[in-house]
Amino acid sequence: MTKTLIFYDERFPYDGVRPSNSWLQQLNDSFEVVNAKQLPEALGNHQFNSYMHLHGPYFPKEAWPDLLAFFKKGHGLLHIGGAPFRKPVHLSEQGEWKIERAQTAYHRQLQIHEVLPVDEAPIEKLAADKKIPVMEGKESLFSVEPTHNLILHVTRFRDRPEENGSSGPMDAHIYPLLKGISQDNREVAAPAVLVENTKGDFVGGRWLLINQIVDDRFWQNGGIEAIAEWATFVRKGVTEIWLKPNYATYEPGDKASITIQIERMVQQTEEWQFDMTITHQSELVWSGSETITATDELEFLRIPVDVPIQKGQYLIECHATSKSGEKRIFTQGFWGNDPDLLQQGSVMEARRDYFWKDGRPFPIVGQTYMTSDVARKFIFMPNVAAWDQDMATMKKAGINFIRTGLWTAWRHMMFIDGHPSEEVLRAIDAFLLTAKKYDIEVTFNFFAFTPIAYEGENPYLDPRSVKAQKRFIRALVARHAETTNVQWDLINEPSMFDPKRFFQGPRSAQDRFEHVAFVKWLQERHESITKLQERWDMTPAELPNFESVKLPEQEEINFDMEDMKRPKQGLRWLDYTLFTMDMHNQWAQELTATIKSITSKQLVTVGQDEALYSQRPTPFFYQEAVDYTTVHSWWLMDQLVWDGIFTKTPFKPNLIQETGIMYVETADSKAKRSEEELRNILERKYAYSFSTGGAGAVQWLWNTNFYMNNTNESNIGALRADGTQKPEADVSYDFGRFIGEIRDLFVDRQLEEVAVVFPYSNDFSNRKFAFDATTKLTRVLAYQMNVPFRAMGEYHLEALEEQPPKLLIVPSAHNFSKEVAEKIFHYVEKNGATLLWTGPLGLDEYWEHSQKLTEQLGDYQLSNVVREEVLTIDGIDYPVSFGDRRIGEVNKEIAGKNTNLVEIAMGKGTLLWSPLPVELNERTNVLIALYQKALGGAGVEAELEWLEGGDLPGIYGRKLTFRDGYLYTFVSEYAVDSLVKIKDPATGKVFQFMLEKERSILFATDKQGRITSSYRNHDIML
């Protein structure tokens, strides 16, 4: 007979109420209690096949190798009392137990990467899971206590090693056995979870982990009996069971079949009975029972369902009972195809700033979603019931938009070019039908990082590759030409061109198609080889003709002033980067045209990350190929306003299409941020998404995806791996309610009076300062001065005439397109605007210096800066400091003997010129003075009058003006709760509130200043 080994030692550290000897003596012969000294030897005894740990985070360090070996035999674990295997304990020289500091090294060997504390405050009651009813009737054993969130890393390989977005083997599954339920009936914690190891090192092992302390309530009210029951449960080991229909969607009149597959992960057999029901629109239409004997070989049972399928959703519920009494409930489902449902309502349309649907504004509060059970495999292992449950929860939260699709495994949808999988396409049909049931909009993503090339050489330029991609896309889009809740995302976070070197900026694939395209592009841009030789600083021998051009590699470019050990030619980098932008657009336009040839109304986009500072396709360039632009605000935590502003193009909406919080660790390998800190960061990201004129925000990700060999992904998600909601899920609920209430406000947004030109020539060059200059400007202008502004791209100034700003700023650009500069000067002369230009004015895009505007400015020369400069504004000298490497990196221009701010008339307008690149200096006082001068001269009016709080660091606030009212957004990046008091000049109303540290306040009013709604129902004093 196999037995359970219990580790309990009266002298060993313990949290909570200890079990008494009399309680332990009630255990029967199938248990044996050992102390710390006896534990290592006992773990090697073959009579034990499960282990019970009563000491919570504390364990004997000496016994760890034996514990790990025990679990690798597939034996069971019952853990009680807090974070598992977190604090090793060893004997001191004095013979006393010494608790070491909390460590991650031990539980990481059990595929638990980290264990985060979970606050008990939101928990009102505890409830047992119904699908695995191990805790049913035992809820009263537990009090509401702080508990823990297990961050799993159970996948150590890729299904598709060559694909960056690949998922991996599902070696373990986690289930919440006991759930903490909040006042509004949300599942917000899982004090007890089950981990079932179905593959890998721990295959067969069942681990039941109670991750909170227990007290007298547990020991005096049946805890011993419960322990005996749970020990029997974990001793049995894992039986893996899957319930699947053979398709996720059927045509009306078809008949479904169900497959049950079962396998014991230990060498034992057991009989199981399966009692199944199928409901159609909640009405029972079929029931059946089957019996299968589970062995250690995979068994299949296919069950025909003799019911003609009708339109609508079918849900399957299967009650599985083993001969020994173990019970589980499995749910699945499928659809009877319902084109009428999919065609209800109108297609979402893109206007200048916001989306519209069914005749109303449609500001987005969204989620990226795959599924809660199999993550990125959801299209290949569809579960309509899981989707239905998750989407019902999202709908309740106010989520109106899902981003989904394929990040990997494209060959599974179309293994052979031109021959898509009907099974996969039917799964996508079912997904869209389920979303439509809940009136949720879906963006479906096709490719990721670089598109699949199939048998071609270059994923963007080889006609064979592009043609295959079009077939891939047509296979799905053609099925949904009339569907009203879908739009298409061509590619997630594209890089050009080399599939093996993504996220690195332009990287050549060094193939014939790219070379031919580059040569052609250069001929069209430069016309003569003589011009190209001059602009690239190359001799006729080095560059005799266009055909001799070589595709550049980054290693051949002098990106740094100290990169001079061997000669490099960097001037060509601007052209190559511009070329990659155009080739991405060409590719996107081709695929967009394919979609539009099938369905002209459905929207198309490209889902891009913070590529603006990495010389990869960015919204101002690719906006011409799509219906709206996107940004994924991830790593640039200090530049969230910049993220939103410099990706919003003048004529199309910009969606913050992925936002979330990357996992970061401390030096001792622990999570750096708490769950509450993560919520606050996400809340700020949502607030900034709307305040910068964005069309909404979409979180990455609803369900944590721990089936990737990537611990970053194991940490990201509104829901934990166990399926319960983190505090950051509050952001979806709170914004979902608030934005839903003010949806109709988003009409005719008033544009900002200040526009900043992003200097792409510099950003795409081999000496780029554009990111540093524009982020410094943003931090000063938008935060310190609370002045809102919008952006335009250097090569995309079509909106200047239609959307004329009063103040136009070109910040510390250095090299800048000569043609575009002339266009800007002409605009200022004609429209009477003020132009603020900082830094060198005479450098063209290829770093050639010439003197522009000599009639107005006289003679000026390019020069180096010194450590401490001075800019004189209206007779006041402001220090300008260029420290560290900036002394050597940047330039100024000298006009006369002094570096005064130059102010001259330019036609109807005014030019303010700082010969110093002030945005690249260390000080902010000079920037504030300069911007105040420009704002005043341009007649820019303040949106808000700050009476209190405006001078505090890290306090951001602005007002969006709409046709029928206003939206106010305030964000704290400050360590102290702050009183904010502002007056709105438009209404004369004064608003006062306490802005909690690291939190956000938003509220809306009508045109008279009457508050119509507030985020989180926060009290705003009038």
Image (cartoon, helix red, strand yellow):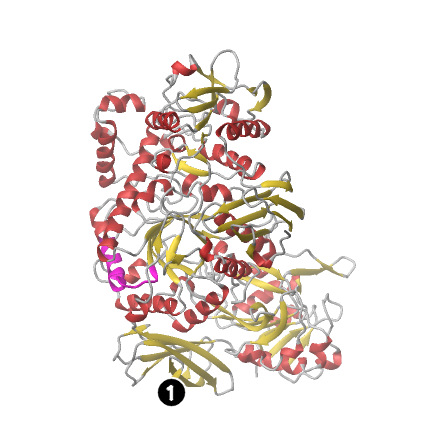
Q: Nearer the viewer, residue 97 or 481?
A: 481
Relative horizontal placement of residue 1015, taking residue 421 as reference (left or right): right
In this rendering, is residue 393 above or below 575? below
| Mark 1 surroundings within 10 Å by alpha-carbon count, few (fewer than 14), some (14 through 19), many (20 or more) | some
Which residues, given as a range, are shown in magenta?
468-486
> SS of the residue at dot 1?
strand
Give the tally of numbered discs: 1
Q: Main secondary structure of the magenta part?
A: helix
Residue 662 shows in the view: no
Asked if residue 1007 is positioned above or below residue 291 in the image, the reply reads above
Q: Which amino acid does label 1 sit on?
A: Ser
Q: Position of residue 429 (x, y in %)?
A: 31, 67
Residue under circle 1?
Answer: 287
Can see residue 854?
Answer: yes
Q: Which of 1000 and 210 is in front in this view?
A: 1000
Place of residue 637 in the rendered image (x, y in percent of width and height, measured from the top left): 53, 45
Task: Please state if 236 lies on the left or on the right of 347 as rendered.
Answer: right
Please tell me which residue is depicted at 33% across the width and 72% down the height of the picture: 248
